[in-house]
């Protein structure tokens, strides 16, 4: 098997707060292969966004990565300096967020924002390798370079399906609809052809018909550019239509991961089963939904053993005392639960 | 007070809406005023007919900005409707004087989407749930007791009484909102996106709670959501809105088995489903986004995004009305109703 594009090992991102240490990401390991989409599922506060921000090197204060490796294309991002990281961000990895209105700068035109990363990253390349004295004499003020960036941005807007892209380049973000803004974000993210795209709930703020357009677009661009995608979502529907593999997180840890079919048809962890049982299926009123009782525990006050034991119907003293490790129970299918076999026998899903 | 479920006669309509319009004028800017231009108007709800029977749940779906919430608020007369009639239990309410309206509010309540914005952060839970009771003239000595009873009903501990909203999680806050709405024993409850702000596992808790309360108290719901999976689970009938109009109305099973309106079909096909078998499905991708409600098209409102081969000049120019196709299935489309 070829080397994965992204290989995260034992990542720990902790927040040092007044109320204690919040282990937002606590020993997470996973890999994303070339051209693959890995779905990260879990409820709010489970650490899915913080995992993505750790990869981007954008963990907010007072958090920091305390341990682990994040290998992107063979390089450990944790060891890079901020200066080096800045050359990687946007060029080899890019991120899109849930709300495009808060991530786009409201006082800059769309064109300025789309060309920014192209100018920065390709500008660097030209300066360092190919841009010799003759090229400088030909283009001393960098006007051609800026023009090339503009052309490339136009091409990207066309690729993401924005009508009249030349006009839209001069528009401000508030003049565009939510779906259009998210397309702009995707254009910015993919403009430097990154190897890895981190998408944090990219369609949650959008209506279903627009969501379908955006997912279709991401799928098409993935095929064209061969980008690997880490898709963070709480919507199993989106996962089921878009992802190759799924990773379920709970309270900062991976509780189950595996191929899409395995997770949806043979979920092993009680939490995954609970999540799947709690969502209504379209047009099926006979299948009663069953909520997970209780709430996600506070992250600075986790139980000693399995973090899910407070809500798990199968939990016993062993679960409360000993933390379960990830075990492989099927081809590529891992689960962190002492009772996984028992759960299968009980047969509730 | 008797805790018995009131006898429910499903045949009786509880809410009858006819030709309801809710327009909002836009304040003209200074240039427009100088030029003497007529003020522009947002046609948020533009001619809606809807009947809700006692004890049923009607789901109202549609994309953001289609007028779902405005319709619900106009039905409750939280906005004064521009035109049309709303009859509640046989009584016309759009012209009711304020004091009679206040008495009627006991019977019609609303649960809001955002459990963070809809609760006053400076009031205790007792004050929040007790306020509608006080307005309806319940003696102060009884309020605490009734609030306690409501808390038990929605699954909150009595210790919640003296706490403030910020001390609760999203799901618990939504329970407080439900308790506030149900405190005055309403017959009709509008639930405006009651679970959209919640995590899936909590969402299921709230849906089940709403259904249990409906069975116990004989409530009638108008359930607004953009999530078709949720609406298909809770509703007896579903109304699909597009740009201020109901374009299709049918019993839930019927709507999912045989959606008729091209918009409904696209909407249903756009929902990502949790299934591994039977993929890939046929997906109808709609181009563009809905037109603006400031200047809605003259004919069919869906014309600009319609993908039917049959569409023609009639669609562009003539406004289709809801036509009964049998089995309680109504649709507003020339091509489907055969009025091309």
Image (cartoon, rainbow, N blue to C red):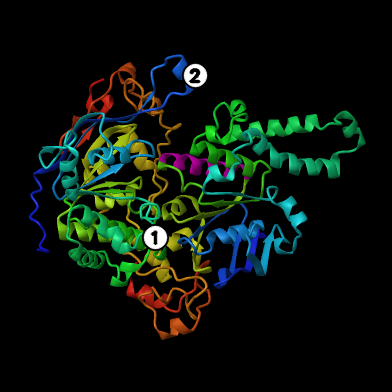
Of the pair A49 and A7, the residue shown nearer to us: A49
Dot 1 or dot 2: first in sequence order is 2
Q: Are marks 1 and 2 in contact (CB under 8 Å)?
A: no
Q: Residue at label 1?
A: B170
Of the pair B21 and B13, the residue shown nearer to us: B21
Label 1 in the same subunit as label 2: yes
Q: Position of residue A267 (x, y in %)?
A: 42, 66
Residue at image point 47% right, 84% down: A321
Q: Viewer-nearest of labels 1 and 2?
A: 2
Residue found at the very far right of the displayed protein: A133
Q: Chain of mark 2?
A: B
Residue at image point 62% right, 47% down: A226
Q: Is residue B42 left or right of residue A40?
A: left
Q: CA distance from mark 1 to mark 2?
A: 45 Å
Q: Residue at label 2?
A: B31
Q: Chain of mark 1?
A: B
Check the image and report above or below for B103 versus A71.
above
Quarter of the image where one finds residue B322? top left
The answer, for residue A287, to whether it is visible in the render is no
- Magenta residues? A209-225
The question of residue A218 being in magenta is answered with yes
Residue found at the very far top of the displayed protein: B35
């Amino acid at each position: 098997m070829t080397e994965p594009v992204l290989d995260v090992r034992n990542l720990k991102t902790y927040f040092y707060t007044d109320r204690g240490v919040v282990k937002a990401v606590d020993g997470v390991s996973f890999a994303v292969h070339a051209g693959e989409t890995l779905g990260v599922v879990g409820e709010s506060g489970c650490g899915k966004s913080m995992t993505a921000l750790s990869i981007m090197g954008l963990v907010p204060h007072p958090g920091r990565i305390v341990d682990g490796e994040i290998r992107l294309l063979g390089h450990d991002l944790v060891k890079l300096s901020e200066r080096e990281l800045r050359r990687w961000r946007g060029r080899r990895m890019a991120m899109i967020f849930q709300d495009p209105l808060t991530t786009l700068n409201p006082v800059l035109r769309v064109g300025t924002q789309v060309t920014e990363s192209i100018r920065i990253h390709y500008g660097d390349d030209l300066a360092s390798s190919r841009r010799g004295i003759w090229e400088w004499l030909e283009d001393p003020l960098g006007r051609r370079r800026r023009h090339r960036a503009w052309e490339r941005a136009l091409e990207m807007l066309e690729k993401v399906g924005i009508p009249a892209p030349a006009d839209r380049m001069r528009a401000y973000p508030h003049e565009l609809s939510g779906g259009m803004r998210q397309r702009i974000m995707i254009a910015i993210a993919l403009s430097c052809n990154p190897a890895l795209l981190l998408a944090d709930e990219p369609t949650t703020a959008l209506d279903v018909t627009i969501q379908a357009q955006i997912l279709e677009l991401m799928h098409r661009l993935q095929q064209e550019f061969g980008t690997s995608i880490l898709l963070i979502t709480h919507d199993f529907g989106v996962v089921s239509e878009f992802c190759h593999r799924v990773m379920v997180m709970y309270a900062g840890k991976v509780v189950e991961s595996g191929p899409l079919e395995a997770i949806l048809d043979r979920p092993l962890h009680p939490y995954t089963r609970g999540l799947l049982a709690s969502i209504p299926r379209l047009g099926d009123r006979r299948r009663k939904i069953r909520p997970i009782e209780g709430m996600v525990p506070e992250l600075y006050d986790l139980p000693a053993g399995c973090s899910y034991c407070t809500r798990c119907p199968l939990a016993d003293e062993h679960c409360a005392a000993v933390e379960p490790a990830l075990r492989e129970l099927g081809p590529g299918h891992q689960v962190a639960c002492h009772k996984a076999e028992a759960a299968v026998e009980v047969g509730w899903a | 007070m008797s805790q018995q479920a009131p006898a429910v006669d499903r045949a009786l309509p509880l809410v009858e809406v006819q030709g309801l319009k809710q327009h909002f004028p836009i304040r003209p800017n200074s240039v427009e005023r100088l030029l003497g231009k007529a003020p522009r108007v947002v046609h948020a709800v533009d001619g809606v007919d809807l009947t809700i029977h006692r004890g049923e749940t009607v789901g109202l779906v549609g994309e953001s900005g289609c007028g779902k919430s405005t319709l619900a608020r106009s039905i409750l007369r939280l906005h004064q409707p521009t035109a049309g009639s709303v009859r509640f239990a046989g009584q016309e309410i759009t012209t009711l004087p304020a004091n009679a309206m206040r008495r009627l509010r006991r019977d019609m309540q609303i649960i809001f989407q955002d459990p963070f914005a809809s609760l006053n952060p400076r009031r205790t839970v007792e004050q929040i749930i007790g306020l509608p009771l006080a307005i309806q003239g319940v003696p102060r000595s009884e309020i605490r007791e009734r609030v306690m009873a409501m808390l038990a009903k929605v699954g909150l501990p009595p210790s919640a009484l003296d706490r403030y909203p910020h001390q609760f999680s999203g799901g618990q806050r939504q329970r407080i909102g439900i308790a506030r709405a149900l405190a005055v024993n309403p017959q009709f409850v509008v639930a405006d996106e009651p679970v959209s702000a919640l995590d899936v596992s909590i969402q299921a808790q709230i849906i089940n709670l709403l259904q249990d309360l409906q069975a116990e108290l004989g409530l009638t719901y108008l359930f607004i959501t953009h999530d078709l999976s949720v609406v298909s689970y809770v509703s007896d009938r579903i109304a699909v809105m597009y740009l201020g109009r109901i374009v299709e109305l049918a019993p839930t099973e019927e709507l999912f088995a045989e959606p008729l309106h091209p918009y409904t079909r696209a909407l249903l096909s756009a929902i990502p489903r949790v299934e591994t078998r039977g993929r890939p499905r046929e997906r109808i991708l709609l181009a563009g986004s809905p037109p603006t409600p400031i200047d809605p098209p003259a004919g069919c409102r869906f014309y600009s995004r319609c993908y039917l081969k049959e569409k023609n000049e009639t669609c562009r120019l003539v406004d289709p009305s809801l036509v009964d196709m049998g089995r309680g299935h109504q649709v507003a489309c020339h091509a489907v109703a055969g009025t091309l």
